[in-house]
Structure formats: C-alpha cells, structure tokens
Amino acid sequence: MATENKNLSEYDKNTIPNAKDFRFGIVVSEWNETITEGLYNGAFDALIDCEVPATQIIRWNVPGSFELIYGAKKMLQTQNVDAVIVIGCVIQGQTKHFDFVCEGVTQGIKDLNVQTDIPVIFCVLTDNNIQQSIDRSGGIHGNKGTEAAIAAIKMAYIRQQASMSHPFNQPLLTSGAIQIEETPRKIDKE
C-alpha cells in the first residue's frame, strides 16, 4: 500500500510556489461526512498555511462522490478558480456499486482535466474499510486532503506559468520549488 509508511500531511513550504494570489474551489461529498470533513479540513488548513486567503477558497457540497463531477464542472464554469479539489470517500461494500462509483468518478475527473484548462485535483478515498479512510483523513497516515491542497497549488502554478509569454525557467521560484524547463527539440534535416 502506497501510504503505509508515509505521512500524507508532510510538505516543505520552501518547495511550494507562492499561492497568495490563487483562488481555489473545493467540492466536498456529504456521503461519509466524517471522513470528507477531515479531508476538507486538511486541504483548507494547508491552503491557509501556504498563505491563500480564506476569501480565496470556495467550498461547495454535493450529496455523494458521483456528484463531484458535476459540482466541479459547474465550479469551473462559474467561479474563476485556478484549481479545484474534489473530496470524497467511497468504501468497499458487498456489491459492485463500489466499482461503478469509483470508476465513474475517476473517469469523470480525468475528463474534466482533459476538457478544461483548469486543474481538478482528485482527493477521493477508495478504501476497503472505514479504518483505512480514517487513517488517511487525519489519522495515522496524515491527511490526503493536505496532499491534494499542495498538488492544487503546484498545478495552479504550472497553469499560470504555461499561460505566460516567457518560459518556465525564469527565476520566479525559491530553492527546490517546481521548475519546468523547455528542452529544445532537435530538428532532423533531410
């Protein structure tokens, strides 16, 4: 298991782009509310810790994880955000419903990332039991919401840099932060 020996809440602020001017949306599923509230708190606290003003964080609730797709789509269309985090929790039951919901949500969020220019960060726990979800929403493995917030900041920064007229390798970053350099393409002459 990928998170077995990792605390999801650990990050180095020196490696994270300045986030004070970004605007974030968070769409939260009300299903498995104890878990999703823990994930939301982790995401919100990490954004605040990275100097995002609370007024620049928009929260919308949706009934369940399947509805995260529509909620994120509408947020992208109406809220002028730099990134959206979708937060949900689906726990394995005794039927195939788990498989269908997980597949649909995963594909739907992937589709939003392909179809729009604003990153949508996937923070949907798909665990075998409630204890695994507790462990990843503020428990022994930290908080997947925190990890999603850091990913959202990094992706908002990449989006911002990609829209600028100068290349990524400008000195805009602190030591160790995200930096993407363009590599000149070699053109074969025939």
Image (spheres, rainbow, N blue to C red):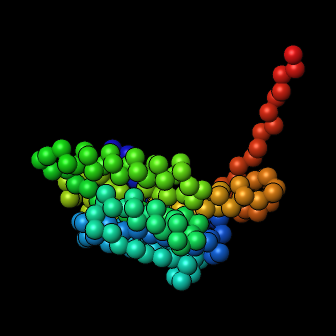
Residue 31 placement (x, y as % from top left): 25, 66
Residue at horizontal 75 percent and vertical 53 percent from the top = 168
Q: Is residue 184 left or right of residue 36?
A: right
- Is 162 or 35 nearer to us in this picture? 162
Answer yes or no: is residue 30 visible: yes
- Is 159 or 137 nearer to us in this picture? 159
User: Which quadrant of the figure contains the N terminus?
Assistant: top left
- Is 5 or 150 nearer to us in this picture? 150
- Is 44 or 6 nearer to us in this picture? 44
From this viewpoint, which residue is outermost toward the right?
189
Answer yes or no: is residue 175 visible: no
Residue 94 placement (x, y as % from top left): 12, 47
Looking at the image, is 5 positioned above or below residue 157? above
Residue 45 placement (x, y as % from top left): 46, 75
Residue at horizontal 35 percent and vertical 52 percent from the top = 105
From this viewpoint, which residue is outermost toward the left?
94
Quarter residue 83 falls in: bottom right
Quarter residue 51 falls in: bottom right
Looking at the image, is 52 positioned above or below residue 71? below
Counting labels gives: 0
User: Which quadrant of the figure contains the C terminus?
Assistant: top right
From this viewpoint, which residue is outermost toward the top?
190
Residue at horizontal 77 percent and vertical 39 percent from the top = 183
Residue at horizontal 60 percent and vertical 56 percent from the top = 117
